[in-house]
Amino acid sequence: MSSYIKFLKDILAKKRKINDFETVALTQATNDDFKNGVPEKMTDPRSFTVSYSKGGMDLGCALCDLGASINLMPLSIFKKVGIGEGKIEDVLVKVDKFLFSEDFVILDYKADRKVPIILGRPFLSTSCTLIGVHQGELTMHFNDEEIKFNVVKPMKFPSDVENYSAIKSFGWDYCEEEAYYELFNT
């Protein structure tokens, strides 16, 4: 056992105080020990986007952010429907064949046109989302079924959207489909 590794074990086992300074010679064997023990750096999946569509039409992306403690939509989306600022409860979020009920905070802010909606930890928790950093996959569970997304590579939509897993629509019980269609096509 090299002297450096023995030194570290003594500190970690609290046999020595950290205040004690000692010069330790590093050998090639110690250097090899560190090379073998350093894990590969993985991509940070803290925030990523998933595509969503309505009626077979690509409408952009929703940002899934592990750092966000709320689900957020801009006020501009609700102006045409006649809903004001505040908290909107029980918004139905459909992901492929799964339907989740979520609460959203509606704020007047300048949203990114490509990614206007932010889905935070509440949505990711409700949808029983697991993030496999090593595989680069996000998996949503509902009962015994699951949907997988690749979060490392950007999601691309072919013309036949219905055959792929993605967030397909956001619907509200007080919002008719025609008003919803107008809302997202301006």
Image (cartoon, rainbow, N blue to C red):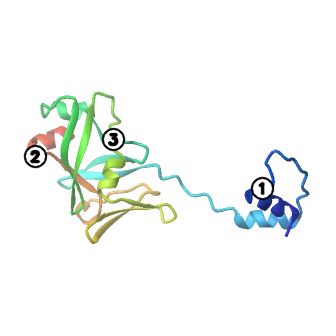
Question: Residue sitting at 88 percent across and 59 percent down?
Answer: 26
Nearest-to-viewer mark from 1 and 2: 1
Residue 146 in the image, given as x and y percentages of width and height: 31, 68
The residues tagged by marks 3 and 2 sit, at their Cα atoms, a distance apart of 21 Å
The residues tagged by marks 3 and 1 sit, at their Cα atoms, a distance apart of 42 Å
Question: Residue sitting at 36 percent across and 59 percent down?
Answer: 129
Nearest-to-viewer mark from 3 and 1: 1
Numbered disc 3: secondary structure: loop
Say what amino acid the circle numbered 2 marks.
Asp
Where is mark 2, residue-wise?
173
Numbered disc 2: secondary structure: loop
Q: Answer left or right for 147 relative to 38.
A: left
Up-down relation of residue 119 to residue 108 (above or below)? below
Q: Answer left or right for 168 relative to 157.
A: left
Sooner in the amino-acid sequence: mark 3 or mark 2:
3
Q: Answer left or right for 136 relative to 112.
A: right
Say what amino acid the circle numbered 3 marks.
Ile
Question: Residue sitting at 73 percent across and 67 percent down?
Answer: 36
Look at the image and tell me in which quarter the N terminus lies: bottom right
Say what amino acid the circle numbered 1 marks.
Ile
Look at the image and tell me in which quarter the C terminus lies: top left
Up-down relation of residue 22 to residue 129 (above or below)? above
User: Which is nearer the eye, 148 or 61?
Assistant: 148
User: Contact, CB < 8 Å: mark 3 with mark 1?
Assistant: no
Question: Residue sitting at 17 percent across and 30 percent down?
Answer: 79
The residues tagged by marks 1 and 2 sit, at their Cα atoms, a distance apart of 61 Å
User: Which is nearer the eye, 178 or 119?
Assistant: 119
Report whether residue 114 is seen.
yes
Report whether residue 185 is seen.
no
Where is mark 1, residue-wise?
11
Where is mark 3, residue-wise?
70
